[in-house]
C-alpha cells in the first residue's frame, strides 16, 4: 500500500498482474507503442516520441479525461528512458510525503539514478504545495510528470506551468476503443457475443474512456450469453455511463459556453444536444434559463432589435 499512500519507493514494473486482477489492469500496455489513441504524443513525430528517442525527458503535465492512459503513460516513460519511477497521489499525500519523496530522489541521484516523480491528481495540491516542487524541478532532482483532469491554466500555479510542458491526451476514438476490445478478446480467448450494431453501441457508450469500456467488456465476458446481443439487449444488460459533468469546473463552463455559441451560430441541432447534455447530467434548469435569457438579449437582441 505504500505505492498508493505516498509511493515513496520506486514501484516494481516487471511483475505480471495476478490472473484475477481487473481486465483493465491485465491489459495495461507494457511498451509505449502499445498505448492506443495517443499517437499524436507517442509517435515518432510526437512530443513524447521525440523525448524518448533523445533519451531525456523534460517535466510535463498530462492533461486529459479519465481512462485515456495518463498513469500508464507516465510509468512507461520511466521504463523507456531508464528512470526510477516514484508515484504519489495528491489525494493521499501531504508535505511530509513530498519531502520524503524528494529526499529519496536525492539519494537515488547520488547513485546515478534519475527519478521520474509521478503526481496523480496534481491539481488537488494547493498553491503552497505546488510551489514546493519548484526547486527540485529546477535543479533536476526530479523530472515531474503530473496528471490532471482539470484545466492546468486554472488548477496549477503559473510558476509550475512555466517549468513543465502541458501535453493533452485525447479521448480514445472508435478505432482505439475497438482495438482495446480486440485485445481483451484475445487475452481471455473469448469473443464477445454481440451483433455488429451492439459492438458499435458498446464503443459509443464508453465516450472515449478506455477503462470504462474494459470494465463493460469484463462484465459481458463473465456472463453466459446464448445468442448475440443486439443494442437493446446490451442496454438492458449493462449500466449506463453517467455523464461526466461538474457543476463548478470545466465541464459546467465548457458546455454552457458550447450551448451559447451554438445558439449564436444558428445551429439548432447542436443547441439541443448541449442543452440535453446539461439537463441529463443534472444541471439546474434555472441556470440554463438565465443563460438563454442572456443569449436572447445579448446576441439575438443586438443582432436584430426587431426580433
Image (tube, rainbow, N blue to C red):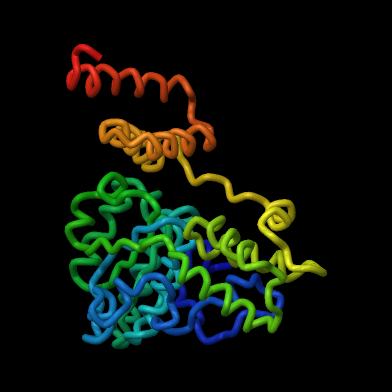
Quadrant of the frame with the C terminus: top left
* Residue 76 horizontal/vertical position (percent): 41, 79
* Residue 253 horizontal/vertical position (percent): 35, 36
Residue occupying image coordinates x 25% and y 66%? 136
Query: Going by the image, does 293 lie left or right of 241?
Result: left
Q: Based on the displayed image, in which of its 4 quarters is residue 110 positioned?
A: bottom left
Quadrant of the frame with the N terminus: bottom right
Q: Is residue 149 above or below residue 197?
A: above
Q: Is residue 98 visible?
A: no
Q: Based on the displayed image, in which of its 4 quarters is residue 267 positioned?
A: top left
Residue occupying image coordinates x 34% and y 79%? 107
Q: Nearer the viewer, residue 234 or 90?
A: 234
Q: Is residue 37 above or below residue 111?
A: above
Query: Going by the image, does 178 lie left or right of 40?
Result: right
Residue occupying image coordinates x 25% and y 77%? 57
Q: Is residue 18 visible?
A: yes
The image shows a total of numbered marks equal to 0
Residue occupying image coordinates x 18% and y 19%? 302
Query: Going by the image, does 108 lie left or right of 297?
Result: right
* Residue 87 horizontal/vertical position (percent): 44, 69
Q: Is residue 10 above or below residue 90?
A: below
Q: Nearer the viewer, residue 267 or 257?
A: 267
Q: Residue furthest front?
A: 306
Q: Is residue 173 above or below residue 150?
A: below
Query: Going by the image, does 117 lie left or right of 53?
Result: right
* Residue 261 horizontal/vertical position (percent): 28, 35
Q: Residue furthest top?
A: 306
Q: Nearer the viewer, residue 247 or 111?
A: 247
Amino acid at each position: 500500500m505504500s505505492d498508493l499512500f505516498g509511493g515513496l519507493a520506486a514501484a516494481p514494473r516487471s511483475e505480471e498482474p495476478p490472473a484475477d486482477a481487473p481486465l483493465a489492469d491485465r491489459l495495461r500496455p507494457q511498451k509505449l507503442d502499445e498505448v492506443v489513441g495517443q499517437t499524436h504524443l507517442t509517435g515518432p513525430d510526437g512530443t513524447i516520441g521525440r523525448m524518448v528517442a533523445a533519451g531525456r525527458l523534460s517535466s510535463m503535465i498530462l492533461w486529459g479525461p479519465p481512462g485515456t492512459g495518463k498513469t500508464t503513460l507516465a510509468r512507461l516513460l520511466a521504463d523507456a528512458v531508464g528512470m526510477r519511477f516514484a508515484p504519489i497521489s495528491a489525494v493521499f499525500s501531504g508535505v511530509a510525503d513530498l519531502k520524503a519523496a524528494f529526499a529519496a530522489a536525492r539519494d537515488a541521484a547520488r547513485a546515478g539514478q534519475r527519478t521520474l516523480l509521478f503526481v496523480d491528481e496534481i491539481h488537488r495540491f494547493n498553491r503552497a504545495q505546488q510551489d514546493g516542487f519548484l526547486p527540485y524541478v529546477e535543479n533536476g532532482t526530479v523530472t515531474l510528470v503530473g496528471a490532471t483532469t482539470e484545466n492546468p491554466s486554472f488548477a496549477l500555479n503559473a510558476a509550475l506551468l512555466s517549468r513543465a510542458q502541458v501535453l493533452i491526451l485525447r479521448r480514445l476514438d472508435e478505432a482505439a476503443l475497438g482495438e482495446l476490445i480486440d485485445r481483451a478478446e484475445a487475452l481471455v480467448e473469448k469473443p464477445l457475443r454481440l451483433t455488429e450494431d451492439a459492438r458499435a453501441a458498446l464503443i459509443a457508450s464508453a465516450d472515449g474512456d478506455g477503462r470504462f469500456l474494459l470494465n463493460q467488456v469484463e462484465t459481458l465476458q463473465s456472463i453466459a450469453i446464448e445468442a448475440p446481443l443486439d443494442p437493446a439487449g446490451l442496454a438492458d444488460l449493462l449500466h449506463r455511463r453517467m455523464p461526466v459533468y461538474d457543476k463548478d469546473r470545466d465541464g459546467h463552463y465548457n458546455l454552457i459556453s458550447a450551448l451559447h455559441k451554438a445558439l449564436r451560430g444558428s445551429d439548432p441541432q447542436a443547441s439541443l444536444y448541449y442543452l440535453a447534455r446539461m439537463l441529463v447530467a443534472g444541471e439546474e434548469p434555472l441556470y440554463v434559463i438565465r443563460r438563454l435569457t442572456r443569449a436572447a438579449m445579448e446576441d439575438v437582441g443586438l443582432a436584430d432589435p426587431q426580433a
